[in-house]
Amino acid sequence: MSTDRYVSPLSERYASREMQYIFSPDMKFRTWRKLWIALAETEKELGLPITQEQIDELKEHAEDINYEVAKEREKQVRHDVMSHVYAYGVQCPKAKGIIHLGATSCYVGDNTDIIVMTEALKLVRKKLVNVIAELAKFAKEHEALPTLAFTHFQPAQPTTVGKRATLWIQEFLLDLEDLEFVLSTMKLLGSKGTTGTQASFLELFDGDQETIDKIDPMIAEKMGFKECYPVSGQTYSRKVDTRVLNVLAGIAASAHKFSNDIRLLQHLKEVEEPFEKSQIGSSAMAYKRNPMRSERIASLSRFVMVDALNPAITSATQWFERTLDDSANKRLSVPEGFLAIDGILDLCLNVVDGLVVYPKVIEKRLRSELPFMATENIMMDAVKAGGDRQELHERIRELSMEAGKNVKVEGKDNNLLELIAADPAFNMSLEDLQKTMDPAKYTGRAAVQVENFLNKVVNPVLEANKELLGMTAEINV
């Protein structure tokens, strides 16, 4: 590793090798050569004088890219595509005259961008499905474990740990729907020439419109796509990049929400992310167990959400059939968005797989607040015993304020049950009141909702994607 120049933390710390390869020079330039082969084969099949010997020569050197030749040539001509056309021609002397025939630079550049983003989306889908699967296991395991719920981060009617996890799952499921839709709509640019009019092919095929119409569909099929965009300028619409990165931003938002909840729960000591035996939480405070994985999820997620603005602005500012002010931005924003979301999903998978739940802490906090939650039930029981509902409501409100003061001002335990038992208006003993303090009585349909959600919504998705399941994630320092 070089220590005298900037190295991106996305490649050194966060993204997997698998995602890094998708955006690597090897992937890019090998795809260029596959596209040149697909173009040559198509032109041969449609009647141009291209020989099988030339095609075979191109295929023979599809993978062994002579980078040094291309680099030296680019110093002279200042054009990356023509440098690689030249380098390919050096390796394929018989075919050099038909490489890139009728095409413009965007034939390899833009089609490759679409192919690379498509492969990257497939990897993101795989990791997202596995995060959902691990969260589903967590939700199932804790579907009936009562826990204090929060609205405005203030104690509220209890839920279950599993029910809370379903909220995280649902967010990711919405992201999966968006991802699958965008993935299903990905199309190649095809080969449409300098302004999208296919004028060069009119010359090559002597104005034969019917034959020219076959070019794009044939190239798409050879490259594993169903179709090409029907019209374009020189480039595919940059709105495609916007749609793709908006999917990533959506996943980042869901991951951020999940990581925030984990950080808050870890503060409450109810749930903790994995913490390794020799891991150090703080350089000064040796006792600390900082939620560094969840914090990293939040940090990277903010980057991805903001990064999604780049292609949106680029799409909005393209002039007519093409300008080049997209190029430098695309080289940064698209790969970095994918590398970051890849790191985020690995972190999510790692965190969910190792979440630690502390039921005793959860129960203690819940029981400290439960008397307040139980007041409606207590009031109904007192009404059944002959009390006046309106009078009882006012008394229980006053007693709740008194108990709240004892907790917040005096620092004492919640004594609401004792206060109610001492009030003759309720005609209830402390023993009777304590019988109502079963936390499971106050979680409503939470456990049933978890069961239904997993069975009817989540499991069918996992079954449809079962070939993607089973991965684990290791994270870097």
Image (tube, rainbow, N blue to C red):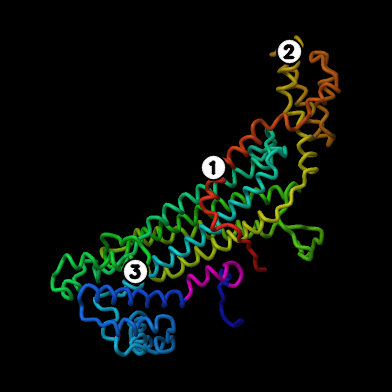
Q: Amino acid at mark 1?
A: Val
The crowd level at tag 2 (other Cα within 10 Å; few <14, some 14-19, many 20+) is few
Residue depicted at 43% across the width and 63% down the height: 118
Residue depicted at 29% across the width and 86% down the height: 96
- Most distant residue in the left direction: 207
> What numbered label is drawn on residue 384?
2
Residue depicted at 42% across the width and 57% down the height: 183
**Magenta-colored stretch includes residue 14:** yes
Residue under pointer 1:
457
> Tag 3's secondary structure?
helix
Measured from the top left, where is residue 29 in percent x and y? Answer: 41, 77
Boundaries of the magenta span: 12-24
The crowd level at tag 3 (other Cα within 10 Å; few <14, some 14-19, many 20+) is some
- In this picture, residue 325 sits left or right of residue 17: left
Contact between labelled residues 1 and 2, with CB atoms less than 8 Å apart: no
Distance in Å between CA atoms under marks 3 and 1: 36 Å
